[in-house]
Image: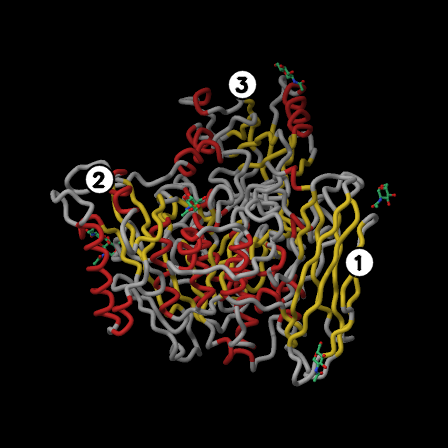
Amino acid sequence: MARTSLLLLAALSVFFSHAYAIHTLDGARPDKAASDGVDTKVYIVFTERQPAAAELSELHAGASVASFHHDLLSDVLDGSSSAPDRVVYHYSRSLHGFAARLTEEEKNKLAGKDGVLSIHEKVVYRPQTTRSWDFLGLPQQNDPTRLPFENDVIIGMIDTGIWPESDSFSDEGLPPPPAKWKGVCSKNFTSCNNKIIGARAYKDGNTTWSPLDLEGHGTHTASTAAGRAVPGASLGGLAAGTARGAVPGARLAIYKVCWDDGCSSEDILAAFDDAIADGVDVLSVSLGGMIAVDYSSDYLAIGAFHAMRHGIVTSVSGGNDGPGLGTISNVSPWTISNTIVVAATSTDRKIISELVLGNGKRIVGNAITVFPNLGKRSLLVDPGKCGEEELGGKRYKGAVLLCGDRATERAIHGSGADGAIVASLDGDNDDIAFSYAVPTILVPEKQYDYILAYYNSTKTRLPMATVMNSATVMDAAAPSVASFSSRGPNRITFGILKPDISAPGVDILAAWSGQASVSGAEIDGRRVPYNIISGTSMACPHVSGVAAYVKSVHPDWSPAAVMSALVTTATPVTSGAPEAELAYGAGQVNPLRARYPGLVYDASEGDYIGFLCAQGYNKTQLATMTGKAGTKCPADTGAVGDLNYPSIAVPVLNYGVGFAAEFPRTVTNVGPTDSVYHAKVTSAPGIKVTVTPDELAFSADNKTLSFTVRVSGSLAPVNSTLGASASVVWSDGRHEVRSPIYVFVHKHVM
Ligand SMILES: *[C@@H]1O[C@H](CO)[C@@H](O)[C@H](O)[C@H]1NC(C)=O
Ligand SMILES: *[C@@H]1O[C@H](CO)[C@@H](O)[C@H](O)[C@H]1NC(C)=O
Ligand SMILES: *[C@@H]1O[C@H](CO)[C@@H](O)[C@H](O)[C@H]1NC(C)=O
Ligand SMILES: *[C@@H]1O[C@H](CO)[C@@H](O)[C@H](O)[C@H]1NC(C)=O
Ligand SMILES: *[C@@H]1O[C@H](CO)[C@@H](O)[C@H](O)[C@H]1NC(C)=O
Ligand SMILES: *[C@@H]1O[C@H](CO)[C@@H](O)[C@H](O)[C@H]1NC(C)=O
């Protein structure tokens, strides 16, 4: 089994990732040549909807759509190969189009045909708790009357599959699936129950593979979103407590699209096509590309756009490429749908690892170490710093090796060492701990030098070291934003604030696959029912779970309304990152407040189309997003900032340059009918924020009311912050509906 999963989901660690990352990051699955041996690549072809198909039964509609695709294709093939052999997927349930293996020439011919909207090359994506829910304020013994409502909510997980034997997926006491469910369980998977109500797999057009999770990632995310409460869960005693998801009563629908070489766009689109038709309420997608791309070339954005049209909330992970600006990769604004991009914040416990030297000195380092006790070992220094070549063949059996920053996991394991101390020289990512196949501890440069000096000073006697198992300590500093968490701004639209919201993503304990090792490495023989991993992949299902929680109370809310509820009730993060809102969005998600937000900023498909028009999208790009050739822009195309978004981003040209911008907004009253709200603003020096009108009186006739936010002034660089934070808060005395505003200089993002 290859070792992609840890890299996919976990933040890339400075150490080890190197040795294994190469095939992962370039991990595009080589396309199988078509049977006739021509040189082909997989392309995604978006087509117009087949009008005739609408009147037919599902089965016949599928056949009719397939023959439409085959006819289109046959016209461009030279006769020596057949269209059905080239097609990888037909998208016909919720999306319109197909994936096929084509030569460049065939692709160009196809592009000119009637009914073809656009053609895109395939892309390979990467997948990117006990304490975490208590930390968020979602009490375990919540209102028991909640459970029956949760039973009606279905969360679709587009991920690496599921390990059904985990206690977290027991269906004890759950009724049969809700009537709206139309999904299936793969023939090759006999473990569906009233918790896991559907499971499918997609690989190169083959849907007969098992959706069983061999990597752990999908099991972990699914149990974070909707796992049952399992007392006494821990990783070898670490982070012990009750493991549970946000909505233990909700159902899970599994769509496995990730394999050991990544997650391919054509498989992901097939999963969206099915999930939307199957009747899920929320989609949780802890996957990402390398960098934000135009929405009409971003398959997750396209899939989520279709989900949004069907009222499905999509929550996606922001990426693990921080702390650089503009590193966030999932940035489309439609509804919580695609829009909730999740940044990782820490829970209030921290995992620490210790090392004791022969002279009694204790050294604190970074790792998740859970092994049978190692005891005292002799300390040896590898002159080659444990680089793969230098260490090759050397035997260090029974020793703890002091390594430089060139160490690789495989090399250390090969040397037979019982443990290793590795220098973490650049100091990045020291807010996150990883598991290693060999007992290993990462230490900062200063400690590394100390250990080396100790080794030198005891040459005559025997230098010794003990690698201790990890312990958890309270971390009073929480919440903060992890260094690896991708940062805004939104490269595609500076005027839409990203990320939207933060949730725990560091050292999260959740269910694990019985087929995957603790560290994800093949050489690691340890198997555990619960594991601790980190990444925005872990933050995403927290937000998906909260979205499902809100849906369980308000089943008819649009994706935009659900996102608004989460964003406007988030707890602002006040300490930490200099990138402020570009690091944590509106702040930390607050499940209990999100249920009753008071007001919501709603938006519909038409509003997003207006937004895309403001973004300058042409007919082809619009058709790609919507699946309709005739999609028209409104007569009066406004600015991107006009989208009724629950936050406001104000990109400005430079420091010290005056600016003024207006943002029209409309709120819908979802609280008591006759409520009167007043606007309060907060701002920063040099920035003026006004709201007109600043009073909104709702009534039975006036459920939605509009206002304008004006932001003006000039930005001054203050204390090495990037921009300035401000906010508008609508309050009726009971609800506080907060929209963050962030003013920043966009030239910093290249
Ligand atoms: C699809 O995958 C199954 C394994 O699940 C394999 O046996 C079968 O040959 C594959 N079919 C095709 C057409 O590749
Ligand atoms: C079921 O899945 C397993 C593992 O992927 C595979 O080996 C087997 O061929 C599959 N069976 C069928 C009937 O496709
Ligand atoms: C330890 O000794 C090595 C040579 O044996 C030397 O290169 C290194 O600088 C010494 N380090 C310290 C910290 O004393
Ligand atoms: C639309 O925009 C895309 C991306 O900029 C471009 O490739 C395409 O040629 C444009 N199409 C039309 C019809 O202008
Ligand atoms: C509804 O609001 C509009 C403008 O905000 C106002 O003119 C009108 O009087 C309101 N109607 C009621 C019934 O309150
Ligand atoms: C800037 O930093 C100084 C010193 O740390 C502090 O006194 C001051 O309040 C800060 N200014 C702002 C606007 O945060």
Mark before the other along the chain sequence, 1 or 3: 3
Q: Quadrant of the N terminus?
A: top left
Give the x, y percent position of residue 5: 43, 46
Query: Whole-Å distance between the Cαs marked 3 and 2?
Result: 47 Å
What is the secondary structure assignment of the residue under circle 2?
loop
Residue 224 appears in the picture as rendered: no
Instruction: Give me the residue at 58% from left, 64% from top.
Output: 563
Identify which amino acid the numbered label 2 is placed on.
Ala
Element type at marker 3?
A: loop
Q: Is residue 93 above or below residue 45?
A: below
In the rendered image, which quarter contains the C terminus?
A: top right
- Which residue, given by chain and number where applicable, does mark 2 sit on? 33
Q: Are marks 1 and 2 in contact (CB under 8 Å)?
A: no
Would residue 105 appear left or right of 337 to someone viewing this image?
left
Residue 18 showing in the rendered view: yes
Residue 369: where, in percent of width, then height? Answer: 55, 44
Q: Which x, y percent locates residue 121?
A: 35, 43
Q: Badge 1 is on which residue? A: 682
